[in-house]
């Protein structure tokens, strides 16, 4: 056997070993795969029944892993029917999103998403800008009315 053929054989054997190692590591540790960047251990849940209790939420979400905290939206505000669920492990949160999105609870289908602070901040910024614009419009109307009254 020539020197060149031994090298190519050694390279192909090494390559096969690396491929097998990758396959076996993926099979042995399926939960440790790379997650998308939006995956978070904090979940935002919408479309909850208004009379659901935190204990019922713990029962539903606790099936997919250890729940660190649940914050239910206030009843009298526009956060009614929403909740934040915080898992201790990011993989448990991913399983909960995969299994509970569209799950029927009390005749309502849950919308389970990963919490994205930037999205919530944009919404809050838009609301504050809208309020500021309304205040400016009121001030302009008041000034126009004062000018017309003076004429």
Image (tube, rainbow, N blue to C red):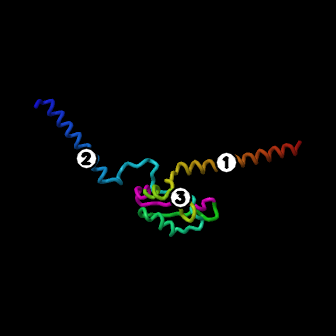
Whether tag 1 and tag 3 are in contact, CB under 8 A, the answer is: no
Rendered position, 74 above or below 9: below
Percent position of residue 1, x then y: 10, 31
Counting from the top left corner in percent of width and height, residue 58 is at 48, 67
Residue receiving disc 2 = 21
Residue extent of the magenta highlight? 78-94
Mark 1 and mark 2: span between their CA atoms?
A: 56 Å
Q: Is residue 18 above or below residue 97?
A: above
Tell me if residue 105 comes above or below residue 16 in the rendering. Answer: below
Query: Which quadrant: the C terminus?
Result: top right
Q: Position of residue 72 (x, y in %)?
A: 55, 64
Answer with the quarter of the image where residue 8 lies: top left
Secondary structure state at the residue bearing disc 2: helix
Residue at the image position 81 percent from the left and 43 percent from the top: 144
Badge 3 is on which residue? 45
Magenta stretch: includes residue 101: no
Q: Is residue 32 left or right of residue 82?
A: left
Q: Dot 2: few (<14), some (14–19), or many (≥20) neighbours within 10 Å?
A: few
| Mark 1 neighbour class, 10 Å CA radius: few under 14, some 14 to 19, many 20 or more | few
**Contact? badges 2 and 3 (CB < 8 Å):** no
**Image-quadrant location for residue 41:** bottom left
Judging by the rendered image, the residue that carries numbered circle 1 is: 130
Relative to 2, say whether 19 is above or below.
Answer: below
Pick whichever of labels 1 and 2 is earlier in the sequence: 2
């Amino acid at each position: 056997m020539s020197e060149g053929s031994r090298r190519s054989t050694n390279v192909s054997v090494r390559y096969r070993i690396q491929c097998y190692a990758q396959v076996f590591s993926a099979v042995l540790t399926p939960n440790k795969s790379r997650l998308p960047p939006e995956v978070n251990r904090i979940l935002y849940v919408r479309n909850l029944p208004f009379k659901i209790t935190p204990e019922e939420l713990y029962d539903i979400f606790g099936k997919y892993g250890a729940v660190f905290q649940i914050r239910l939206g206030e009843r009298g505000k526009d956060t009614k029917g929403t909740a934040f669920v915080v898992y201790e492990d990011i993989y448990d949160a991913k399983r909960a999103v995969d299994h509970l999105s569209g799950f029927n609870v009390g005749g309502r289908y849950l919308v389970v998403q990963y919490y994205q602070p930037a999205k919530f901040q944009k919404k809050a910024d838009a609301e504050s800008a809208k309020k500021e614009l309304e205040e400016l419009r009121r001030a302009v109307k008041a000034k126009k009315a004062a000018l017309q009254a003076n004429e």
